[in-house]
Amino acid sequence: MIEHRSHVYGVVAEFKTEHELVHAVEKTREAGYRRIEAYTPFPVEGLAEALALKRNNVPLITLIGGLTGGLGGFFFQYWVCVIAYPLNIGGRPLNSWPAFIPVTFELTVLGAALSAVFGMLALNGLPRPHHPLFNVHRFVKHATSDRFFLCIEARDPKFHLKDSAHFLKGLNASHINEVEDD
Amino acid sequence: MTEQDYKAPESIDRIRQRALIAGVVGLVICVIGIFKAPDRFFPSYLLAFMFVLGLSLGSLGLLMLQHLTGGNWGIIIRRPLESATRALALVAVLFVPIFFGMKYLYAAWLNAPSSGDGALSEFQRAYLTPNGFRVRAILYFVVWLILVFIFNRWSREQDVNREDRGLRRRFKMLAGPGIILYVFVMSFAAIDWVMSISPHWASTIYGFLFVVGQLISSMALMIAVVVLLSRTGPLSGVLQPRHIHDLGKLLLAFVMLWAYFSFSQLLIIWSGNQPEEITFYYSRLHSQWGVVAVLVLIFHFFVPFFLLLSRDLKRNTNLLPKIAVWLIFMRLVDLFWMTRPEFAPNAWPNLWDLAALLALGGLWFFVFAGQLKQLPLLPLGDPNLAEAIEHHEH
């Protein structure tokens, strides 16, 4: 029956070139695997499409952050100038909105930028000091320099340690490693 | 890539014909306007003139910008941009009636009292003279037309000598100083032709407002034109979502820049609250003109800004041209708001506005469409053309 061990994270295949990797990703998806991830030392053109990565929510988070910053920036000033400390400055109306715009603008940018950075980190699950793939010696040594990796994760419904490893071997992988979970 | 000639489609002749009819009908009404109501006609003519000037000059600015920065977006719209700049010859001719309408447009400095209220400063008396105005106008057009001539000539050359690498360097060398020259001269032109309507009011950012407005109208026109050409013929299969995505991003950038310039001018004058400065906004932010100001703020900035934030919309060949055409319309409303309050207390366009727009817009499009047919719609000699139009979708 299914060889499912709880301490297996997945199986990782190593490729020598980015073309082999993109090709392998396409084949793996065609075979029905969905919980897969690719690791490369540099951005590889066409890889995101091959993985069929979904659009993420960072733009939405940025928009909400920007709107919050802008509205907050405006109404803080409104509150100070109109409600809390109404002062007559050169006969101008208390709600002198043109004077509020530069700060509103700055806080829009601040809110949008901060939420973009932290939203991106949160959606990526970062910071993350350890990852099961670090248990694979060759991965640690080569993933950031000269090799391209494809991992089929154990949570994929089609995952089967031996079959999946065999499948990856058939895609011209130079090394196959089992990834232990911890 | 197989060698294609990318000729403009035949359907362009129909557009040309309609534009010509509109132009001639408009011209006839304009001639009536000159004799019947010159005091109301010339402000309308000035509005229409500044609009078509913007289509040509904005294109000149974008053309130089894309030579300077490179990028696939520029290669896709380069030939339509060049066609629009060549229509500047027509715009120069269309300036002539303004010489005859000077006494209706610039009465404030032509008939300024020599002392007391409304008197000009010593510098203004030296600068704002009828002959100075005429000589400078000719000078402005000479500078722009020389730039247009050189860029178009080299572009034609490039189609023949496709291996000439030196040509690209020359394009770049001229584009940088050319942009500075264009902005500098346009700044003076805006002062002479529009700001001098109220000679006691001055703003240093005024010329930039016109420059960025011209870039908006030109970029919007280019989006509409390339999408249209991709539907009916030579650019179908060439124009990709990534191209109009880039054009949409630039349009968004120009809309933001326009808002930034407009607001900087308002903020400084509003904060200073000096009698000689604030009158400009007093007449533009109250009663009917105040309504126009709010409409410009909402429909020239907020609505396009939030719509253009969307990535999907910028890649949508159906929606992006609609927003582009909308922005061209809002450019007209903005120019109306900038140029008219000195002449009319009520903010309603009149018959002469319609006639002048029909005449100048029609003639401009007639020339523009005719120029589009002159050369292949893509710069065949550009060394980056193949890369610009290749498909890398898997």
Image: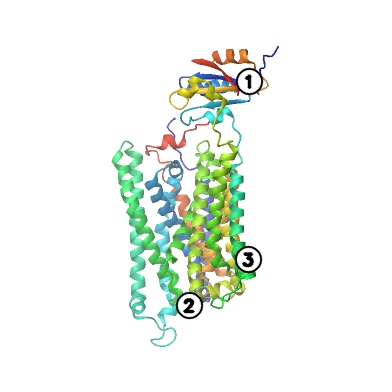
Q: Nearer the viewer, residue B92 or B19?
A: B92
Q: Badge 1 local density, few (<14 within 10 Å), some, or many (20+)? A: few
Assign a secondary structure to mark 3: helix
Question: Residue beneath label 3, please?
Answer: A79
Question: Residue beneath label 2, please?
Answer: B274
Residue placed farthest to the right in the image? A1
Please, which chain is the residue tagged with disc 1 on? A
Q: Badge 3 local density, few (<14 within 10 Å), some, or many (20+)? A: few
Asked whether, in this view, residue A27 is left or right of residue B387, the answer is right
Assign a secondary structure to mark 2: loop
How far is the residue under mark 2 from the one under mark 3? Answer: 28 Å
Assign a secondary structure to mark 1: loop
Q: Nearer the viewer, mark 2 or mark 3?
A: 3
Question: Residue beneath label 1, please?
Answer: A7
x and y, in percent, of residue B7 in the image = 46, 40
Q: Nearer the viewer, mark 2 or mark 1?
A: 1
Q: Could you tell me which residue is drawn at 66 percent across and 17 percent down?
A: A5
Tell me whether the residue at label 2 lies in contact with that at label 3, contact meaning CB atoms closer than 8 angstroms.
no
Quarter of the image with the N terminus of chain B is top left
Residue B137 location, quadrant: bottom left
Tell me whether the residue at label 3 lies in contact with that at label 1, contact meaning CB atoms closer than 8 angstroms.
no
Q: Could you tell me which residue is drawn at 60 percent across and 61 percent down?
A: B298
Amino acid type for the residue under numbered disc 3 = Trp
Pick whichever of labels 3 and 1 is earlier in the sequence.
1
Q: Could you tell me which residue is drawn at 58 percent across and 71 percent down?
A: B289
Q: Is residue B316 visible?
A: no
